[in-house]
């Protein structure tokens, strides 16, 4: 009898393993090529800074809306997976760019890179401007898996860089991860949340203060 080994926890996999969805599991399986085809088309549409419209997407795939919904679920489910699929390579790129750092300094640098990339990606900002309420609901609440995945990814990063008792045991890894994610969201989506200017630099200062990098 053979068993399939569990995927290794990495920055790229921690979030998805912690908060899978019906669609993410379908996309991971080779038995659903139609779901993958629809997802790939939606992702290309999003990167082209165009609105993902389920009717138009179905037509471009040569099927009706009912078939599309059967393949990928509703629009929010599809958008959530598209957004996370773009977050992963952005985080991994930030991880590679900070390979010479360690500890709290590396966590702060990775998250700052991530915030900066989200602020400067024009197709992503267009999505935020086009659908601000939906964007905040998908990105910053538990209504979609994205925030839970981001917290789980940051939790993994905290444990790797600071151990199971970060900051001298003043806070546990999940609590610290949640605070870091909320800071990240606050500075990335400042224009939607409070009318302020999004700022990677202010995020960097906040991350370093929380992680006691300069203390």
Image (spheres, grey):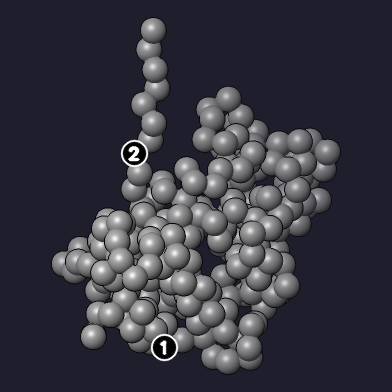
The local secondary structure at tag 1 comes to helix
Residue at x-position 48% and y-position 60%:
151
Give the side of residue 24 with respect to residue 202, left or right.
Answer: right
Q: Badge 1: few (under 14), some or many (20 or more) residues near its Cα, within 10 Å?
A: some
**Which residue is at 61% across, 29% downward?**
32
Q: Position of residue 173 (x, y in %)?
A: 38, 61
Q: Residue at x 23, y 85 (%)?
A: 214
Could you say which is closer to the camera, residue 199 or residue 59?
199
Q: Residue at x 77, y 51 (%)?
A: 54
Residue 210 to residue 171: above or below: below
* Residue that extends furthest to the left in the rendered view of this protein: 100
Name the mark on residue 171.
none
Q: Which residue is mark 2?
A: 8
What residue sits right under mark 1 in the picture? Answer: 202
Query: In this rendering, does residue 35 appear at all?
Result: yes
Residue 212 lies, in percent from the top left, at 28, 80
Where residue 66 appears, as percent x and y from the top left, is: 83, 38
Q: Earlier in the sequence, mark 1 or mark 2?
A: 2
Label 1 with label 2: CB-CB less than 8 Å = no
Q: For the residue labelled by badge 2, is the local secondary structure a helix, a strand or a loop?
A: loop
Q: Does residue 177 appear left or right of residue 64 in this picture? A: left
């Amino acid at each position: 009898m053979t068993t399939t080994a569990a995927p290794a926890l990495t920055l790229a996999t921690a979030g998805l393993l912690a908060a899978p969805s019906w669609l993410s599991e379908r996309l991971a399986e080779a038995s659903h090529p139609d779901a993958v085809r629809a997802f790939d088309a939606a992702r290309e549409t999003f990167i082209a800074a165009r609105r993902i419209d389920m009717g138009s997407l179905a037509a471009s795939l040569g099927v009706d809306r009912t078939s599309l919904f059967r393949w990928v679920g509703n629009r929010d489910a599809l958008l959530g997976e598209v957004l996370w699929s773009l977050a992963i390579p952005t985080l991994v790129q930030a991880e590679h760019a900070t390979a010479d750092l360690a500890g709290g300094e590396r966590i702060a640098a990775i998250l700052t890179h991530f915030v900066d990339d989200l602020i400067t990606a024009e197709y992503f900002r267009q999505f935020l401007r086009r659908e601000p309420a939906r964007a905040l609901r998908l990105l910053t609440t538990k209504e979609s898996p994205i925030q839970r995945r981001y917290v789980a990814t940051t939790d993994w990063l905290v444990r790797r860089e600071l151990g199971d008792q970060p900051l001298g045991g003043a806070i546990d890894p999940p609590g610290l991860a949640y605070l870091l994610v909320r800071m990240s969201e606050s500075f990335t989506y400042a224009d939607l949340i409070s009318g302020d200017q999004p700022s990677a630099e202010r995020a960097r200062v906040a991350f370093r203060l929380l992680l006691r990098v300069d203390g």
